Structure formats: structure tokens, C-alpha cells
Image (cartoon, grey):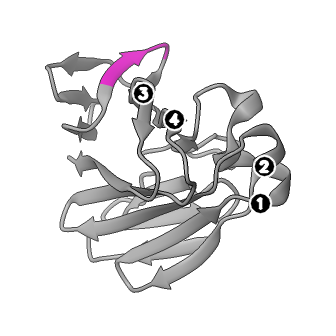
């Protein structure tokens, strides 16, 4: 488990799946992602949101950069993944604390010599109901809340989860692309 913090929040990131396991307020020790260790946290889905083919949860992630307020993990294809998903790729996910925000960046590089089809998603469990607009969902509880915002993802909220996802996209051979999601904590 990797931990980053600032004076407002502490974030724990599990190297298995590069998921954000805990997001804790330093002021009152409140965990925005749930108090139970069994909670799923904020999970990543790549190259498809289907759990049976989710390499983000099946392959090992490696910590490649760590500071007090940021951590970056990378995922690279393996011979085993290539058999089922015949593409070479590199994925880097970075969690960075900036004041009362957690910025989640996703970098994808297609190392293949052919076009790479993919979709990308994040799933954030939440106990609150939300108000949605085009690029933002505001979730508010009695004493806490989160705004989830992105221009790179479609956002939806239902059944106690916020999902940020892309439609299926194609990335040209040798190209890369960045995606970002911002959580503003209240």
C-alpha cells in the first residue's frame, strides 16, 4: 500500500489494481471511500470495463514515482496478456493531492504497430446521492461531500457508485493519450 498526504487529506493506493483504497480527511479521520477494509475503493478498468478482461486488476502495477503528495504506478503488457489482448501498451496512473483536490491522471501509450482499441473507466463507491451536470457530479452528505469532474470521461451516478468512463476509443500505433479526473473534497 502506498500512502500520500498533505495537511488536509491522506490517500492510500493499493498496488494491486492501482486502486485508491482510502481517502481520509486529516481533520476528522473520515474516509470518503468507506470505513471497511473490504470496500472496493476507487477501481480502474482497462482496456474494457468488463471485469473478466480488466488488465488493470489482473496484471501487476509497479510504483515508478513517489513523493509526499503524489504517487505514480505503471502497468505494462505481458506475454500472457498479449495472448488475449494482442497489443503492447504502457499505462501510468498518477494520484496527486493539490489542496482539497485529488487529481487522478491516466496516461496510455500504444507500443504496438497497429491501432489499439480500448475503453477506460474508474468506479468510485459513494454513500451519497448526487446532482449531475455535463462534466461534474456533486455528491453531498451531512458533513462531507465530493465533486467529481472531468472533460475526458462521461460521468454517471447510480446504485451507490460514480462511474467515469470513455466510449471505446482507438489509439494509433506509437501514439499516447492523457486522461484526467478531479475529485474536490468538501
Q: Which residue is mark 4?
A: 118
Tag 3 residue: 163
Residue occupying image coordinates x 57% and y 41%: 46
Q: Nearer the viewer, residue 143 or 46?
A: 46
The quadrant in which the N terminus is found is bottom right
The residue beneath circle 2 is: 81
Q: Determine whether, in the image, residue 61 is placed left or right of residue 171.
A: right
| Element type at mark 2 | helix
Residue 3 percent across, percent down from the top left: 51, 74
Q: How many C-alpha atoms fall within 10 Å of the one at disc 2: few (<14), some, or many (≥20)?
A: some
Q: Disc number at residue 78?
A: 1
The image position of residue 161, as x and y in percent, is: 46, 24
Q: Position of residue 120 (x, y in %)?
A: 47, 37
Outermost residue, top direction?
A: 159
Magenta residues, as a range?
A: 155-159
Instruction: Give the structural element (helix, strand or loop) at label 3.
Output: strand
171 left or right, relative to 152: right
Amino acid at each position: 500500500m502506498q500512502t500520500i498526504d498533505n495537511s488536509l487529506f491522506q490517500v492510500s493506493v493499493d498496488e494491486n489494481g492501482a486502486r485508491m483504497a482510502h481517502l481520509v480527511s486529516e481533520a476528522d479521520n473520515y474516509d470518503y471511500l468507506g470505513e471497511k477494509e473490504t470496500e472496493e475503493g476507487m477501481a480502474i478498468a482497462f482496456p474494457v470495463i468488463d471485469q473478466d478482461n480488466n488488465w488493470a486488476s489482473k496484471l501487476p502495477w509497479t510504483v515508478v514515482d513517489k513523493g509526499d503528495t503524489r504517487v505514480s504506478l505503471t502497468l505494462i503488457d505481458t506475454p500472457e496478456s498479449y495472448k488475449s489482448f494482442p497489443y503492447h501498451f504502457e499505462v501510468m496512473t498518477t494520484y496527486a493531492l493539490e489542496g482539497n483536490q485529488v487529481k487522478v491522471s491516466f496516461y496510455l501509450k500504444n507500443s504496438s504497430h497497429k491501432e489499439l482499441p480500448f475503453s477506460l473507466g474508474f468506479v468510485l463507491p459513494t454513500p451519497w446521492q448526487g446532482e449531475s451536470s455535463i462534466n461534474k457530479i456533486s455528491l453531498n452528505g451531512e458533513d462531507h461531500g465530493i465533486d467529481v469532474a472531468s472533460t475526458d470521461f462521461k460521468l454517471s451516478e447510480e446504485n451507490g457508485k460514480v462511474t467515469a468512463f470513455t466510449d471505446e476509443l482507438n489509439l494509433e500505433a506509437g501514439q499516447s493519450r492523457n486522461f484526467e479526473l478531479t475529485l474536490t473534497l468538501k
